[in-house]
Amino acid sequence: MKFGHFDDVNREYVIETPRTPYPWINYLGNTQFFSLISNTAGGYAFYTDARLRRLTRYRYNDVPLDNNGRYFFIKDGDAVWNPGWKPMRVELDSYECRHGFGYTKFSSSKNGLKADTLYMVPNGENAEIQRITLTNTSKAKKDVSLVSYVEWCLYNALDDTTNFQRNFSTGEVEIEGGAIYHKTEYRERRNHFSFYSVNAKPDGFDTDRETFLGLHNNYDSPDTVMAGKSQNSVADGWSPIASHRVNVSLAAGESKTFIFVLGYIEMEEAKKWAGENGCAPASKDLLQTNAKMRVINKEKAIALQKRFETPAQVEAAFEELKKFWDGLLSNFTLKTGDEKLDRMAVWNQYQCIVTYNFARSASYFESGIGRGIGFRDTSQDMLGVVHQIPTRARERLFDVASTQFEDGSAYHQFQPLTKRGNADVGSHFNDDPLWLVLGVGGYVRETGDVDFLKVDVPFDNSKTNKASLFEHLKRSFHYTVTHIGPHGLPLIGRADWNDCLNLNCFSTDPNDSFQTSTNKDGKNAESVMIAQMFVYVAPEYAAMCRKLGHEDEAKWAEAEAKKMADQICKTGWDGEWYIRAYDDFGKKIGSNECEDGKIFIESQGFGSMAQVGADKGFPIKALDSVKKHLDTKYGIVILDPPYKDYHIELGEVSSYPPGYKENAGIFCHNNPWVIIGEVKSGRPAQAWEYYKKIAPAYLEDISEIHRLEPYVYAQMVAGKAARRHGEAKNSWLTGTAAWNFVALSQWISGIRAEYDGLRVEPRLPAHVKNATITRMYRGCKYVIAVENKKPDGNIALTVTSGGVKVDGTLVAAGAKGATVELKAIVG
Ligand code: GLC
Ligand code: GLC
């Protein structure tokens, strides 16, 4: 069952009912100011850090679901309704929500009144702009009132939801003209404030939540809205809000547009206050919590309000935003005639950017309070965005590498605001160092920027202790070699990619975090997956060594990779598939000998991507075992059979109920490893079957089962052992985005940036007979016409125009600004 449709021309997902199976959300903002917005206008805004600079309140976990947002109330005679349906949930005559790239639009109507609303964060602005147009479609004149509403968060989101004894006394506001200013804690150490303004003289306002709602009401019947009269309340502690009332008179057929700005302003210490020496002259238009207190210097705020005073200014900013996204998305395009596949090529790239922007911090499943930026996570996210935003990728890689320790290991996470490693979340996830090599490799292959490897980068943010980025990569790579366990495989440390394989944790206390407690010396438990990653990463590392002229190091790395691969064949192979790990007692994990958890996806994925034991047919055997034991109609589960009991020697993986999360859920993140492994093993048809099963555009028709947005991936879908098999959780912020884009763009479309050119090896599905792929690579545009006769056949690549050299399937980098046309015949 569908709840909307794709508008491919405008690149929007059009939601046709507010009653989606779960809030279907979108993200606004690209650099510093961000908002989350659902299809009922729920969500919240923050500046840079969702924990430390939260601007508006949201209530996770509440009923009804998706509580609080930026709401407009319309009172038209006795009818009171919201254009986004919530919070009143009054039946609308029509409703439509369009989530586009960086903006969301609503169009709804009731009783001959139409409301069209646009929400966006313009490029380079610290503000959410809301443009609402009311149109009287009836035959008679209408007098209606429009009431806006946002609830301020007192900036520190964790404190805001816990420390009421303080917070209920600190709230302060100012009201002047059409703007309501939130100045809590501005009197002391904060040099920032927020505001919510309208480009009209309001006919009333409220800034105190209890007055606005009535203490015993819910959001579906605010006293002041129902009564048709604002109280002009001035907040004094408790819960400050911002609400404007605009009375609008509309002749039959007439439209009026209003612009609301939710802005964030930072001030230099010396300029925080208005007037001479910070003493403002008395203004009769100004109201504030305490009339004796100093007044905010509003210069910057007013300048921001003036930039969005007219509909023409908003329209221009909206056009800019669209142009910005057109630019980002033009670096890779895919046209196959399969509309779902073509959509995935577009939407998957959008999700990659959003995931890159937020890491794992703020979604409807991540509270924005718990997590910083993951070392491993962000290094992977890089793989999905580097062709779109190479400069920003470079900056982030620098930040990540700056948190690395001298011995090559790393903090597992760092804070976006401070960029420092977060010791509370621990370190020594022994796969972390290798992801840095992959991330940097991806960047250098894309850009050819070898000089980046020579840049000095701190260890653990030290001002003095630095070494070249290449040296960081060297320590990463050597870290694996110097941390080997009893079976000749890498020690796992706290865990590897699977955060829940906590083989040194041995916890019996429910108050322990699996992620940070350790009760073993870490000298026994080993990871086959890290061994395979090492083999996979080695060619990348060796290539970078050679770019810098370190031939000996390159040879050494290749020899080590060969040794590691041999070792995996000896102690990491179970007969039909790759083993997953060895526990602290030296017992196998992910082996036919085990009662539960006999086979894991990660080692089959990485083993086949790295082609470990290819001469013995291991990759194909392992992939056949995936098909036999892990495949389901909704995707590949992470392991089988699920753990029935808690295993102290395994940790969190066995803590989840069967079929969920790391205990046999369909972890969409590592499905693409199998997809890539299948392509590399010469079986594109099987790769395609797996791709289709989890790609959201292909799941649109079963939205009532899947439940989450049909335009983005979720981290997890309930596995076959779960009662709710097929139901997704944790959409948007997941490494799934980047890895599926790698699978789609590099292996199914077959376009890969290499160190010395662009590889063109399309392995498209059989039903796609002809396709056009465009790819910007180092400033040159490649237009590739694909004729797909036999997807696993030989590839003949020729240049039709543009005159660059082709060597087999490798095309040389063309001149900047040039266009190169290629023809690829497959089969
Ligand atoms: C989550 C984490 C990621 C981890 C995965 C598997 O998605 O963000 O770092 O690899 O779970 O545990
Ligand atoms: C839990 C989750 C896992 C995540 C980790 C770190 O272990 O199951 O997916 O990676 O927390 O936040």
Image (tube, helix red, strand yellow):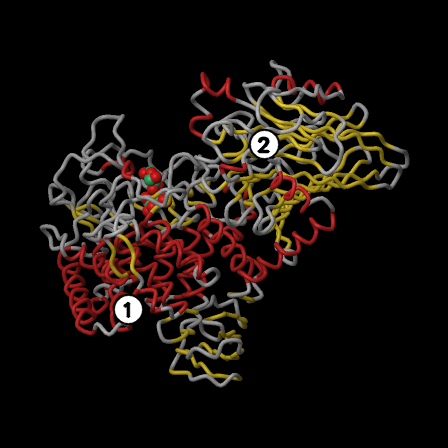
Residue 605 coordinates in the image, percent (x, y): 31, 56
Q: Is mark 1 within 8 Å of ligand 1?
A: no
User: In front here: 263 or 625?
Assistant: 263
Q: What residue type is labelled 2?
A: Ile
Q: Which residue matches tag 2?
A: 296
Q: Which residue matches tag 1?
A: 544
**Dot 1: what SS?**
helix
**Dot 2: what SS?**
loop
In the figure, 693 relative to 135: above or below? below
User: In front here: 344 or 213?
Assistant: 213
Asked whether the beta carbons under mark 2 and mark 1 sit within 8 Å of each other, the answer is no
User: Tag 1: Cα neighbours inside 10 Å, few (<14), some, or many (≥20)?
Assistant: many
Query: Left of 168 or right of it: where is 496?
Result: left
Tell me how far mark 2 sits from mark 1, CA to CA.
53 Å
Please indicate, yes or no, whether residue 438 appears anywhere in the rendered image: yes
Q: Which amino acid does label 1 sit on?
A: Met
Query: Left of 543 or right of it: where is 280?
Result: right
Q: Quadrant of residue 232?
A: top right
Query: Left of 411 or right of it: where is 71?
Result: right
